[in-house]
Amino acid sequence: MNVRRLIPTAALAGAVALGAAALTSCSGAGAVGGEDGKLGVTASFYPLQFVAEQIGKEHVKVDGLTKPGVEPHDLEITPKQTAQLGEADVVLYLKNLQPAVDKAVAQSGVKNIVDAATLTELEAHGASGHDHGSEEAHAEGEGHDHSHGEGGTDPHVWLDPVKYAEIAKGVGAALEKADPGHAADYKKNTDELVGKLAALDTEFKDGLRNTASRTFITTHSAFGYLAERYGLDQEGISGVDPESEPSPARMKDLQAVAKKDNVTTVFFETLASDKTAKTLATDTGLKTDVLDPLEGITDTSQGADYFEVMRSNLKNLQKALGAK
């Protein structure tokens, strides 16, 4: 797989806005009440596409720019997608997450563009260090290039159900504005989705309240918001590229962390190789398991949608951290 990068906050917002636009553009309905009478929404990648589908339901035609199995950060936009984007009623994207999308959205001329990064507060999270409590942006650690995006912010806000709910509210408001005739339905669907996310937040809080360890090691440092929300410590192996070989010094550090913090498991993800995780696990006698950053759903995902995969993540974290 290609290098994975942290998506900065601004980038995330951009992606959301772009996604919405892309969805609309591919619908073939340039305006509300087009060929099929549906609002055309283009979403830049899966988390924004899912929100648009959950809130828009039968009133929208949602299209995603990032196809299943494609690494979102490395997406290239085709001329056809660029043209379709310009026809969308609404574009949802997360700015600074996908440079090609940012450029296409800026050139699209679409009136209703939603940048998800503007709907919630983005923060900086280091590849290593404690990502919870009141601590602010963490040092990036030598050799960890997490500087894309404004101020090196972390774009993975959808992995925190509370922040994802804030994005959902913003997307709902954008759909109401773009298609006022169905505003009541959009509002109702937004409230339902926010309620489901509140329930998921409670499941994570309760499920991770009492564990033998609070530290988890992952190949992709995408879980800073989740760690911060539930009082955990994320330790990333190499940060930017889950397939790169970490330095001997970093491996030594992680071996020490694993011993000190009672770590049992090294997590890898579904869209990237598990080679690095297995190398560290072999060297430290640890197990490996999946923690999915939910940037896309594929046949190998541990669930069919956002909620199913998040619950699989919770179950895997509980097992690894020794939940009581």
Image (spheres, rainbow, N blue to C red):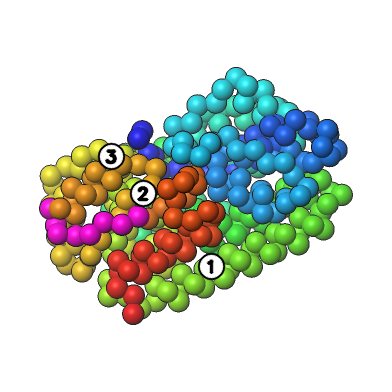
Q: Residue at the spot x=44%, y=50% of the render?
A: 301
Question: Which residue bears the numbered disc 3?
Answer: 243
Question: Which residue bears the numbered disc 1?
Answer: 200
Q: How far across and down, in percent of the image, does residue 103 sit?
A: 56, 27
Mark 1 and mark 3: span between their CA atoms? Answer: 31 Å
Query: Could you tell whether 89 is left or right of 210 in the image?
Result: right
Residue 212 lies in the magenta-colored region: no
Asked whether disc 1 touches disc 2, contact meaning CB atoms under 8 Å apart, the reply is no
Asked whether disc 1 touches disc 3, contact meaning CB atoms under 8 Å apart, the reply is no
Q: Is residue 270 visible?
A: yes
Given the image, on which type of amino acid does mark 3 rest? Glu
Q: Residue at the spot x=47%, y=45% of the render?
A: 298
Question: Which residue bears the numbered disc 2?
Answer: 269
Residue 106 numbered tag: none
Tell me the element at label 2. Answer: loop
Mark 3 and mark 2: span between their CA atoms? Answer: 11 Å
Query: Could you tell whether 194 is left or right of 178 in the image?
Result: left
Mark toward the start of the polypeptide (1 vs 3):
1
Q: How far across and down, in percent of the image, does residue 231 sit?
A: 38, 68
Mark 1 and mark 2: span between their CA atoms? Answer: 21 Å
**What stretch of residues is rendered in magenta?**
283-290
Relative to residue 64, is residue 228 depicted above or below? below
Q: Is residue 19 visible?
A: no
Given the image, on which type of amino acid does mark 2 rest? Glu
Residue 286 lies in the magenta-colored region: yes
